[in-house]
Amino acid sequence: MPNAYESMDTATLDETIATLEAEADALKARDLHLDMARGKPSPEQADLSRPMLDVLTSTSDLTDEGVDVANYGCPDGIPSARRLMADVLDVDPADLVVSGSSSLSLMYGVVSHAMTHGVCGGTPWGRQDHVRFLCPSPGYDRHFAITERFGLENVPVPMLADGPDMDEVCRLVEGDPSVKGIWCVPKYSNPTGVTYSDEVVRRFATMRPAAPDFRVFWDNAYVVHDLTQPGDRLLNVFDALAEEGVTDRVYEFASTSKVTFAGSGIACVTASPTDMADLRRSFSFERVCPDKICQLMHARYLIDAAGVHKHMAAQAEVLRPRFQLVEEKLTEGLADLGCASWSHPHGGYFVSLDGPEGSAKAIVSLAADLGVRMTGAGATWPGGDDPRDTNIRIAPSYPSLDELSQALDVLVVCVRLVSARLARSAR
Amino acid sequence: MPNAYESMDTATLDETIATLEAEADALKARDLHLDMARGKPSPEQADLSRPMLDVLTSTSDLTDEGVDVANYGCPDGIPSARRLMADVLDVDPADLVVSGSSSLSLMYGVVSHAMTHGVCGGTPWGRQDHVRFLCPSPGYDRHFAITERFGLENVPVPMLADGPDMDEVCRLVEGDPSVKGIWCVPKYSNPTGVTYSDEVVRRFATMRPAAPDFRVFWDNAYVVHDLTQPGDRLLNVFDALAEEGVTDRVYEFASTSKVTFAGSGIACVTASPTDMADLRRSFSFERVCPDKICQLMHARYLIDAAGVHKHMAAQAEVLRPRFQLVEEKLTEGLADLGCASWSHPHGGYFVSLDGPEGSAKAIVSLAADLGVRMTGAGATWPGGDDPRDTNIRIAPSYPSLDELSQALDVLVVCVRLVSARLARSAR
C-alpha cells in the first residue's frame, strides 16, 4: 500500500501535520506516565501464581524422591523439577540441569565459560583472534548485550517470516570458522513473534559449521506462552538433530520467569550429553547447588507440562485482550495510511512495529515527550543500531487495558506525525 | 608433649600396633557408613527454619517498600533484604547487593569478571602475564578451586593462631604486582576456627599493595555462627579501611546458607562504592534481577541482625553438643599421646586436626576403609597438596550425636594406628 502522506499534495500534508501537532499537544497536556517498554507480566498475571506460595509450609515433606531439599546437594536440580522442565521442552531429564532463577544468567554463564575455558575443552573464545556471533535482527537486546560485553562481533542477520534468513546464516556458519554461535528465540521470537518453521529448524541440523565449537543458543523463552489455542508448533530441535545424526550443536534454555513470578522462577539448560558434561563441570566450581526450595515449590505447583499449559491458559486470558487492543488500535489508526506494518503474534510478549525508513528514533522520542515510554529505538539490533531505523518493539503486557489504550492512542499519533513530517521533509 | 609412640620401646610399640589393628578390624566388622566430610547442617538445624515457609502465602502483601516483589526489577535486591544483610555485616545497605542463593557463586562471578573485564576497568587478569592469589592454608577448598580453575597461581601462606601470617602476606602483596588477591574466611575460619585479630584485620588496611587491582576476598561465611555467647568479635574490615582512609580494597561476601536452608538462602556482596559500581555493571549483563520472592521470605522471617542472632542461638543449641563431643572424644582418645593437636573453635563448622607429619592421607584412607568418610586429606591446601600431610578437617555438624560418637571412635583409632605405624617405620 502506498504511503498516504507521500501521496498527499503539499498543502494537504502541511494541514495534516498541523492537525497532528495539535493532537500531540493535547496529549502532552494530559501529562501521561505510561510504560510499554519491557516485557513484564501484569500484576493480574503475577496474581495467578499466588497459590504457589501455599504449596510449601512448615509441615511439608521437604524431600523429593529421596533428595533432601532443605540441605546442600543435588547440583543438577531436584528430580521433580528436572522432570517438569524436561517435559515442557520434550527432552530427556538426564540431559537437563535446573539451576537458578534466570535463564539469561545461564546463557551469560555459558558464553563466559566458552570465553575463558572454551567449548568442551576447545581453545577459549577469549584466546581466539576474532569471534563472531550471529544476531537475527530484530531480536532481543539482552542477548546481543552479552556477546557484545565479551567483545565478540555481533553480526546481524535478517529475520524473515519463518525465522532467520537461513541462507545467510548457513553461508556465514559454514564459510567462516570465526562464527561461533547464534542467538535464537525460536518460538514467538522477541520481538517479531515469529515461530521458526520446520524447515528453518532442520537447517540448524543439516548445516555444516566451519568451527567445531560453533553452538546454537536456543532460548525457548516463550515455549508455553500461547495467546490462542492451538499455539504455534515448533519442531523439537533435538529431534531434528537426531534425524541428521548430529550432536553437540545446541544449548537450549528456558525458565518459568513468565510462567510464575517474573524473575523468581526456575531456569534450565539442556544440551547433548557431551555438552552437558562440559557445563556441569563448569557449574561445579561456581556453586555448591541451586536453590532447591524454590524448585520444590515450582515442581509441586506446576507438576508437569500439562500443569504448565493449564496455568498458561489462565495467563493467556489476561494477555489476549491486550494484544487484541494493540491490533485494533493499530488497524484503526494506521491501516489505511500505508506508513507502518506490524506483527500479529500468536504468543510471546511483543508486537513488532515498522514505520517508514528513518522514523523509529523520532517516534520513540516523541512518544516519550508525550508521556509514553517505549523500548529504545534500535534496541532490537546489535549495538542498538537499526540500519533502516524502522523497528519499534511494543510490550503491551504490563499496562492495564485503560492505560494501554491511552498509550496506543499516543503511539498512533506519533507514528502518523513522524511519517507525515518525513514525507514533508523529502520534498 | 612428646609423641608417646615415638617414645615407646619397639616391642611395646609392635604390641600396641597389633592391639590397634585388632580394634580397627572390629570396627570394620561393624560395616559403618558415616560421613564427617562436608560442612552440612543437620536435619534438626534445617527444621529450625521450617516456620519461614509459612511467612508467604497466597494472600501476602508482595511489595517491599514500594517494590513489586512478584515482578521483574530491583536488580540490587529488595530493600528489606539489603537492610537485613547490611545489618548483619554492619555496613551501609547502599553499598550492598543481595543476589542469588550462593555467596560462592558471587565470588566466582567476581573472579570471572576480573579475568575477562578487569577490576574497575583495569587490564583483565586473563590478559596479564601471570596472576597469583594468596591462599591462607589450611583453608577452604572451594575457594582455592575457583582461582585454580581460572589458571591463577594459588600461593599458600601460613594460617597462624590469629589469622594469616601477615608478615608473609604483606611481603607478597607489597612486593609483587602479580599478586591480585587473597582468600579470607575472617571469622571461625574454615577449617581452623580462627577469628582474625584486630591487628590482622588492620594490616589489610595498612598494607600498600603493589597491584592497583589487588582485592581481598573477605568471605564472612560464619559471621553469625557462634557456638557460645559471646562469640568471637571480628573487627569490621571496612571500619579499619576507613580509619586508614583506604578504599577499593575489600569485597565482603555472606549468605544465609547455614542460617536458613543450606543452598537455598540469600547471598550478598558489599564493597566500596566504586567497586560496587563496577560489579553492578557486570551484574546488569548477567540477569534481569535476582529471585526476590526468596528474599522477601527471608527478610520477613529474619527481620534484622537481632532476628538472625536469635535464630542462630537455636542452631547453636543443636551444634554445641556435637562440637563438645568432638572435644571430649579427641581429648579422651588422643590428649595423652602427643601425636595430634586440634582446634577448639567458638563457632563455625569445623574442627581442624593435625596428626604427625605424613599421617593425614593415611588416616583419612584408613577411616574410609572403616566406613567413615572424611574431607579428603590435603583438600584444605591449594592443589590438594598439604606439604606436611598433617591436616584433617572434621565436619561434625551433619551426623547425629550417636553417629558422630561412632565416627569419632573410628577416627581416634585411625589417628592412633597411623601414628604408631609411622613411629615404627621411622626406626
Image: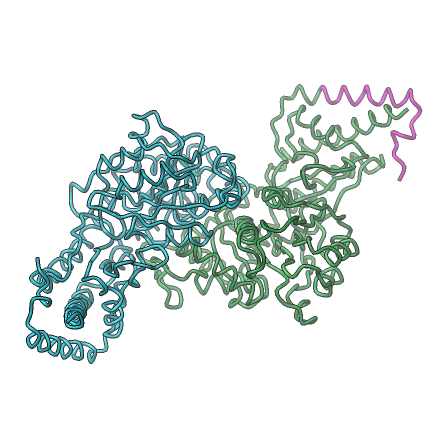
Chain colours: A green, B cyan
Looking at the picture, tell me which residue is in the foreground, A370 or A147. A147
- In the shown orientation, is residue B282 left or right of residue A358? left
Where does the magenta region start and end? A1-25
The residue lying at 8 percent from left, 57 percent from top is B1
Position in image of residue B164 (x %, y %): 27, 44
Viewer-proximal residue, B382 or A183? B382
Give the image location of residue A401, x and y in percent.
63, 37
Q: Going 10% across and 68% down the picture, which residue do you hit?
A: B5
The answer to which quarter of the image holds residue A44 is top right
Residue A256 appears in the picture as rendered: no
Where does residue A272 sit, x and y in percent of width and height? 58, 66
Q: Is residue A13 magenta?
A: yes
Relative to residue B144, is residue B410 drawn left or right?
A: left
Q: Residue at x 88, y 26 (%)?
A: A426
> Compared to A245, does A262 lie above or below?
above
- Where residue A341 appears, as percent x and y from the top left, is 79, 41
Can residue A101 be found in the magenta stretch? no
Q: Main secondary structure of the magenta part?
A: helix
Residue A319 visible, this orientation: yes
Q: Nearer the viewer, residue B165 or A329?
A: B165
